[in-house]
Amino acid sequence: MATFKLKFRPSTAEGKPGTIYFQVIHRRNTRTVYTGYHVMPEEWDGRTSFIRITGTPERQARLQLTASKLRWDSKRFTSLIKDKEQSMVEYTADDIVSEFRQLPPCQTWFGFIHSMVAKKLRIGRLGTAKTYRDALSSFSRFRNGEDIAIDALDAELMGRYEAWLRGQDVKRNSSSCYLRTLRTLYRKAVEKGLASDKDIFRHVFTGFAPTAKRALPIDTIRTIRRLNLPDGSDLAFARDMFMLCIFLQGSSFVDMAYLKKDDIKNGLLQYSRKKTGQSISVGWEPVMQEIVDAYAHLTVGSPYLLPIITKQDGTERRQYERMEHKVNRLLKKIGGMVGVQVPLTTYVARHCWASTMRDMGVSLSIVSKGLGHENLKTTQIYLSSIDTEGVVKANRQLIGKIFENKSDRNLFNKTCRFIL
């Protein structure tokens, strides 16, 4: 049976790091596999034939990463030899070395997440890509930028990460979101055979904690709509995007950013959600067209309905993200103007649409379909039977409630035919 050893060869030059290599032995034949990893003599433990973790915190982190890669390579050598023995076929030390060299290099955690981000971007799943990037950014800060081999991740590390998040005053649901995202990515790595499943998230919170109500009363929504803001100002644009988000059945900002003019046909706006790919249909009302018309001069020659993405040069995602940050910053100012206690964002508008619909007595199945939810188990079986007209009807009722006073209602009645 073949065996292997991990060995260290000091450098012939004084003060230079030596080389770590594997020695494969089978039937008195010895072959050498260089790892490409180098350590100083004092960083090698001759008694255990392995790396000694020492030095500054930064150096220790690098040595830990190298050690985890070496453990991963050792597991692969063990697996190769085991497979050869079980096959009952003659093999040589050269066969073991050759097959080992054909294996992909040890995948690191950061590198794997970067590859998953790139995959999501290629298929247009921008929201998921951003979620992956945000989780990686947080975990990287916890690690002081030091990568780690996937198979070196364990429950203790995730527990320390959760404690670090608490120490950074990260809210419990935000912490849970980061951990759920990392758990999803870890499971994908396990499926690809890059790590063994050690249930490393078993001791951390990945659920949903109760949160403060984000939705606004209908009177507050009316007050925001009536604010006297300078035409063409950034504040007016932010307010109009907030209102349009409500009118469009609580549409997410990324979906609004990518809406195109030719998505409107026969009185319906139809598009696919960026997050899930689910098809959404919205009855196109004059109050929506009024907002679009106010900014039509900024979209001349553009296929997009709104002036959020203004250039088609490969930076579309960054354009919408920058605009979203700007609009949300301005909405917080608007919230201060009307005395809103919660930070006002476009996501609050989505909550407003859903909560107002519920308060109007609209069925949960219609609300779910209007929002484009696809994973609400209690309503999923009903979604296929809810037609677009039911959602359009409910949405018109909501818009009618916003246009509450007599002059507003007269304007609304002149332009909209209620399906009641």
Image (spheres, rainbow, N blue to C red):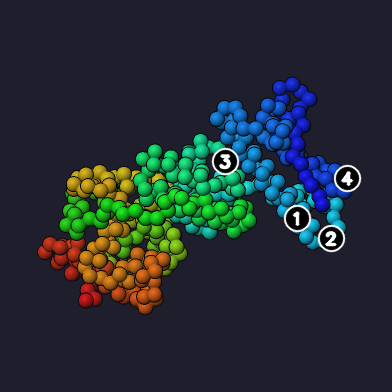
In primary-sequence order, the first of circles 2 and 1 is: 1
Q: Nearer the viewer, residue 324 or 14?
A: 14
Decide which of tag 3 and tag 2 comes sooner along the chain.
2
Label 4 to label 1, Cα distance in Å?
Answer: 18 Å
Q: Is residue 206 visible?
A: yes
| Residue 33 higher or lower than 298, as above or below | above
Q: CA distance from mark 2 to mark 1?
A: 12 Å
Q: Is residue 75 left or right of residue 399?
A: right
Residue at image point 42% right, 62% down: 273
The residue beneath circle 1 is 82
- Which of the labelled discs sits on residue 352, or is there none? none
**Category of crowding for the residue at label 3, using alpha-carbon neighbours closer than 10 angstroms: few (below 14), some (14–19), many (at least 20):** some
Give the mark, 3 or 1, whose residue is nearer the N terminus: 1
User: Cα distance, mark 4 to mark 2?
Assistant: 18 Å
Label 1 neighbour load within 10 Å: few <14, some 14-19, many 20+: few
Identify which amino acid the numbered label 1 is placed on.
Lys
Contact, mark 4 vs mark 2 (Cβ under 8 Å)? no
At horizontal 58% and vertical 42% (from top left) the residue drawn is 148
Mark 3 to mark 2 CA distance (whole Å): 39 Å
For mark 2, does the 10 Å Cα neighbourhood hold few (<14), some (14 to 19), or many (20 or more) residues?
Answer: few
User: Residue extending furthest left?
Assistant: 406
Residue at image mark 3: 147
Q: CA distance from mark 3 to mark 1?
A: 30 Å
The residue most toward the top is 14
Q: Residue furthest bottom?
A: 385
* Residue type beneath disc 3: Asp
Residue at disc 2, secondary structure? loop
Image: 144 above or below 211? above
> Can you identify the residue that label 4 sits on?
28
Q: Which residue is mark 2?
A: 89
